[in-house]
Image (cartoon, rainbow, N blue to C red):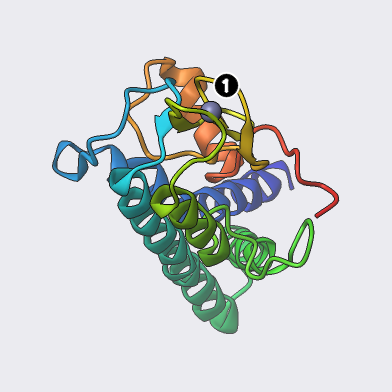
Amino acid sequence: MIASIFQFLCGLIFSLFLPRLPLMVLPRLNVMDGQLAPFPMPQPVDKHLISQMLIMSTLWKLSFLFALIPLAVGYLILTSFASPIAFGLFIGAGWAILSRLIPTRGFSFPNTPYSTDLIHELNEIRIQEPTCCDSAEIVWETIAVRCQNCRTSHLDRARPDLGRLRNDGLIGRFRLLFLDGHPIINNNLDD
Ligand SMILES: [Zn+2]
């Protein structure tokens, strides 16, 4: 009985985290260097940020593909015999897909931290002439897009993971794995 529960949990955890790996690993490879500001500095709103957001958005969509693999494998095994690990794979992958589809706030669908609307808004900020002050410097800080010179907020959105190389070691890895790209703080609960 305990062995079955252990196998089920192994399958569950594997299929929950497998879809998160592309986003966690790929953007941090050397070849993918997007010339962004080093982590955890505020990131200037420039063309590098926009292209990085587009890459992150694509990688995030890849997670569906990585969730389908354990879903299919689990299902195929379950059709022939009852295996706790296959059941875990199936449930975990199903949950991974559902959690990406169901909006948790507002009405963003799917539940991505790299929505087209957000990228569009950032690009608008990038191409517009900033009017807040004379020497405006627009950067994306942890909780909002602000001007570094006069502190005016230009977009009230927390910064998701930008795929930059991190220096916070194992804790940072775990944080990435659990947050799946989403920012750790949510300040747009009522939009
Ligand atoms: Zn300013």
Question: Toward the viewer: 83 or 19?
Answer: 19
Apparent side of residue 47 relative to residue 1 in the rendered image (left or right): left
Task: Mark yes or no: residue 141 visible.
Answer: no
Q: Which of 134 and 10 is in front in this view?
A: 134
What percent of the width, then of the height, locates residue 18? 46, 52
Q: Which residue is drawn at 51% across and 66% down?
A: 116
Asked if residue 32 can be seen in this view, the reply is yes
51 to 170, vertically: above or below:
below
Please name whichever residue, 48 or 148, is drawn nearer the observer in this view of the structure.
148
| The residue positioned farthest toward the bottom in the image shown | 79
Above or below residue 40? Residue 136 is below
Residue under the image location 65 percent in, 33 percent down: 184
In percent of width and height, residue 97 lies at: 61, 67
Farthest residue toward the left? 31
Which quadrant would the C terminus be assigned to in this image? bottom right
Q: Mark 1 points at which residue?
A: 150
* Residue 41 vs residue 125, the one in the foreground: 125
Q: Is mark 1 within 8 Å of ligand 1?
A: yes
Q: Position of residue 65 (x, y in %)?
A: 42, 70
In the depicted structure, whether residue 59 falls above or below residue 90: above
Secondary structure at badge 1 equals loop
Displayed quadrant of residue 93:
bottom right
The residue that appears at 70% across and 47% down in the rendered structure is 5
- Badge 1, how many Cα within 10 Å: few under 14, some, many 20+? some
Badge 1 amino acid: Cys
Residue 113 percent across, percent down from the top left: 57, 52
